Image (cartoon, rainbow, N blue to C red):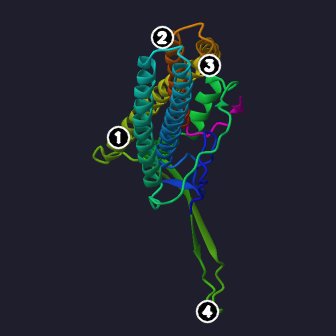
């Protein structure tokens, strides 16, 4: 049975409750391993949350641009009425308002599609209401590569299954080898001569040591030993190869995450700087100090910064999901 939080955010817990089991049964060994790694459906759900977060950011950017377009058009109309700017400036900002409105419609459509994809990934009714919480970004600063690799070795179900299979193969090899060893046994025979109660002869016990030495079995036991040894070697090689591939996967996911995380602070600073530049350009334009070209240029820089930051946030959430998949571990970050 699963529990879901319908205010998805970058730090939302979407892991379904419960346990996945992986069992291995072989002659000489019978065990079950509890695998608490996230179910396969959870990673697509987290990716869907990231896509929903991304499209919501795009919608917010489009909404901000629409508000800015309305504000600039009002300012330009006032300046035109005052004879400060020509009619051409009014027409230009009317066109910008129309384009901003179209961009808003496109962004809202993309957000609705992302919401439907998210609900479908959880097998829920597509009409279910979903809203995003406005929470700070979560950064995984302080989590080392070594810690991630150790978590993968411990939690990845592939490695667990291979380790159990390797243990079973070792026991089968030991069993096959022991089948060709000499067997020394003690045998005793009890002869009771007083059963009838009339015999005067004593009860005798005959004991003997029996040594059984396998001389010829048609090569069956030797073949079993060789087969068990080959199976053990193959499993050991598979375990080593799988471990190295998982280690590489974890390292790639970790380095990607660290790269994107390092870019987030710079992108956030770019948004703040470009917003300040736009406000200055707007004030200069309102006072007739600068032209609309300067205002347009500052607005383009501001929009590029917002879009870039939204893209980097999306990349970050995807990178977190990939690292959690590679390590089969849910990592807790720090609010920034």
Q: Quadrant of residue 92?
A: top left
* N-term-proximal mark, 2 vs 4: 4
The label number, if any, that marks residue 293 in the structure image: 2
Residue 134 image point, x, y percent: 65, 40
Residue 227, numbered circle: 1
332 inside magenta stretch: yes
Tag 3 residue: 275
Mark 4 touching mark 3, by CB under 8 A?
A: no
> What is the crowding at mark 1: few (fewer than 14 residues within 10 Å), some, or many (at least 20)?
some
* Dominant SS type (magenta): loop
Q: Position of residue 178 (x, y in %)?
A: 47, 45
**Mark 2–mark 1 distance (CA, rounded to whole Å):** 80 Å
- Mark found first going from the N terminus, 2 or 1: 1
C-alpha separation, residue under disc 2 versus residue under disc 3: 16 Å
Q: Earlier in the sequence, mark 2 or mark 3?
A: 3
The mark lying in front, picked from 4 and 3, is 3
The residue beneath circle 4 is: 196
Measure the C-alpha gap from mark 2 to mark 4. Answer: 127 Å
Report the magenta residues as a range. Answer: 326-336
Secondary structure state at the residue bearing disc 3: helix
Image coordinates of residue 142 in percent, x first then y, are 70, 24
Visible residue check, residue 35: no
Question: As displayed, is residue 317 above or below residue 296?
Answer: below
Q: Earlier in the sequence, mark 4 or mark 1?
A: 4
- Specify whether 223 is left or right of 254: left
Q: Residue furthest top?
A: 289
**Above-or-below relation of 114 to 280:** below
Query: Within 10 Å of the Cα at label 4, are there few (<14), some (14-19), or many (20+) other Cα atoms?
Result: few
């Amino acid at each position: 049975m699963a529990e879901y939080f319908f205010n998805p955010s970058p730090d939302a817990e979407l892991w379904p409750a419960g346990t996945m089991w992986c069992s291995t049964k072989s002659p000489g060994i019978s065990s079950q391993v509890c695998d608490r790694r996230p179910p396969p459906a959870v990673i697509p759900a987290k990716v869907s949350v990231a896509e929903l977060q991304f499209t919501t950011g795009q919608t917010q950017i489009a909404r901000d641009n629409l508000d800015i377009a309305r504000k600039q058009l009002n300012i330009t109309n006032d300046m035109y009425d005052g004879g400060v700017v020509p009619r051409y400036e009014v027409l230009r900002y009317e066109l910008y308002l129309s384009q901003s409105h179209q961009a808003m419609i496109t962004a809202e459509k993309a957000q609705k599609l992302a919401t439907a994809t998210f609900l479908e990934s959880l097998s829920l009714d597509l009409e279910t209401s979903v809203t995003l919480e406005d929470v700070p970004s979560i950064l995984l600063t302080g989590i080392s590569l070594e810690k991630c690799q150790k978590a993968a070795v411990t939690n990845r179900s592939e490695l667990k299954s291979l380790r159990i299979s390797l243990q079973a193969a070792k026991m089968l090899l030991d069993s096959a080898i022991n089948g060709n060893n000499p067997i020394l046994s003690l045998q005793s025979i009890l002869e009771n001569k007083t059963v009838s109660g009339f015999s005067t002869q004593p009860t005798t016990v005959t004991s003997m040591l029996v040594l059984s030495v396998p001389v010829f079995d048609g090569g069956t036991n030797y073949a079993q030993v060789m087969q068990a040894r080959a199976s053990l070697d193959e499993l050991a090689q598979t375990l080593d190869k799988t471990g190295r591939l998982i280690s590489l996967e974890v390292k790639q996911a970790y380095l990607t995450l660290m790269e994107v995380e390092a870019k987030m602070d710079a992108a956030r600073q770019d948004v703040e700087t470009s917003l300040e530049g736009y406000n200055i350009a707007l004030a200069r334009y309102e006072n007739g100090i600068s032209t609309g070209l300067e205002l347009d240029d500052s607005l383009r820089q501001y929009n590029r910064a917002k879009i870039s930051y939204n893209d980097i946030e999306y990349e970050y959430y995807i990178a977190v999901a990939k690292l959690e998949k590679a390590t089969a571990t849910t990592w807790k970050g720090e609010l920034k």
